[in-house]
Image: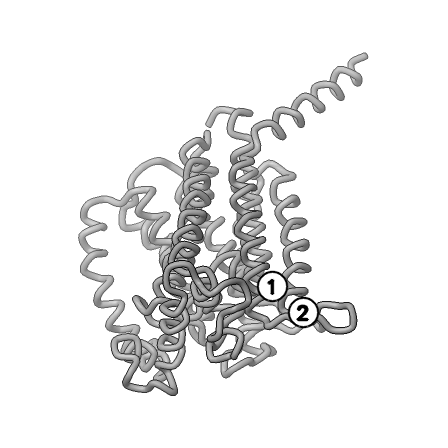
Amino acid sequence: MHAGMNMESAAFMDTRLFSHINWSLIAWMLLLFLTGLLNLYSASGTRFEDGIFVSSFYQKQIIWGVCGLLCMIAALSFDYRRLRNFAWPFYWVTLFLLALVAVMGKTVYGATRWISLGFISLQPSELAKIAVLVLAARLLSSDGQELGWKRFFSVLLMGLVPCVFILKQPDLGTTMMLLLILGGMILFHGLRASVLRSCLVAVPCAAALLWFVGMHDYQRQRILSFLDPGIDPRGTGYHILQSRIAIGSGQFWGKGFTEGTQSQLRFLPERHSDFALAVFGEEWGFVGCVSLVALFCFFLLSIFSTAIQAKDRFGSMLVVGIFFYFFWEILINMCMVIGLLPVVGIPLPFISYGGSATLVNFTLLGIVLNVSMRRFMFKG
């Protein structure tokens, strides 16, 4: 009898968890992923031959999407509070993988960022985003007091260590993303006034140091080309110029699905990854771009509402970190594509092609859903 009651109680608990899941977030996520698939279908120049579709990027993204959904299900299948215990081990494993990249990493276009696993390549810098995010949530949720110097430096140092490895790959975009995510989480948690004032002075100094010491020549040239793409229209300024032409030629309604000349005639570089938005803008125009921005806004709002509703500090800080992860990637990529920011190689979530990024995106959303579906199960 007692065992039967326990089974009924467990079933009731599972039903409650399932009923509290954030279905709106799942809907926005699926809409974005399907939009990305259609855009990738067009960007890849997909054609029909001998009864089958020919498009490696399109087909691979479907496979990555299925794997991502499995990762999302795995991420919401356990109590997220257990992540506190795995934060440090996962962080050290990630640092080991980043060090391994320097020893036996796969080099593509002059950047050594991947570990070859045979039929796929693993990008540890993407795992670093999750590792830093989870560990920062643990450190920042230990108490609700505003950060003083000691705790601020401990959290900052934790984020800077993987940044050193990633910057040497070189991968300025991911390095910047890690710092922005960490900075957003710290500001959301709160800083003492003295620490905040000092940071406002230190950030410009750190930027100057990064410019003269931390950047490679080609990275500085990208920023100069951003200020004036005409300096090197066939070199570093080519990406921005072609992207502007593609988006501008879409005008108000766009040229239509698979009808974009810049992408179909392959004038637009990296059209399946960093500049996927330019393909979308050329084919769907101003109306399509505004609709996509609105879709991302609903997506972000759904994540932020989960952070506000979380019943413990750890869950709230986890979701806040994930919110800033998506917020900065969306903002930076969109500004980069239209020429408001330099080209730094940051993909647009769910729209750009990328295996490691897709797995990370779905896994992080699984954590958000995990926090959401357990928000009524306990008091924090």
365 or 166: nearer the eye?
Answer: 365
Q: Amino acid at mark 2?
A: Ile
- In the picture, residue 39 is in which quadrant? bottom right
Residue 365, image x and y in percent? 54, 46
Q: Quadrant of the N terminus?
A: top right
Residue depicted at x 43% and y 45%? 300
- In the picture, residue 142 is in which quadrant? top left
Circle 2: is it few (<14), some (14-19), or many (20+) Cα within 10 Å?
A: few
Residue 377, image x and y in percent? 55, 25
Residue 138, image x and y in percent? 46, 44
Pointers 1 and 2 in contact (C-beta within 8 Å) = yes
Q: Secondary structure at mark 2?
A: loop
Q: Amino acid at mark 1?
A: Gly
Q: What numbered label is drawn on residue 120?
A: 2
- In this view of the protein, can residue 104 be seen by the observer? yes
The answer for how far apart the CA atoms under marks 1 and 2 are is 9 Å
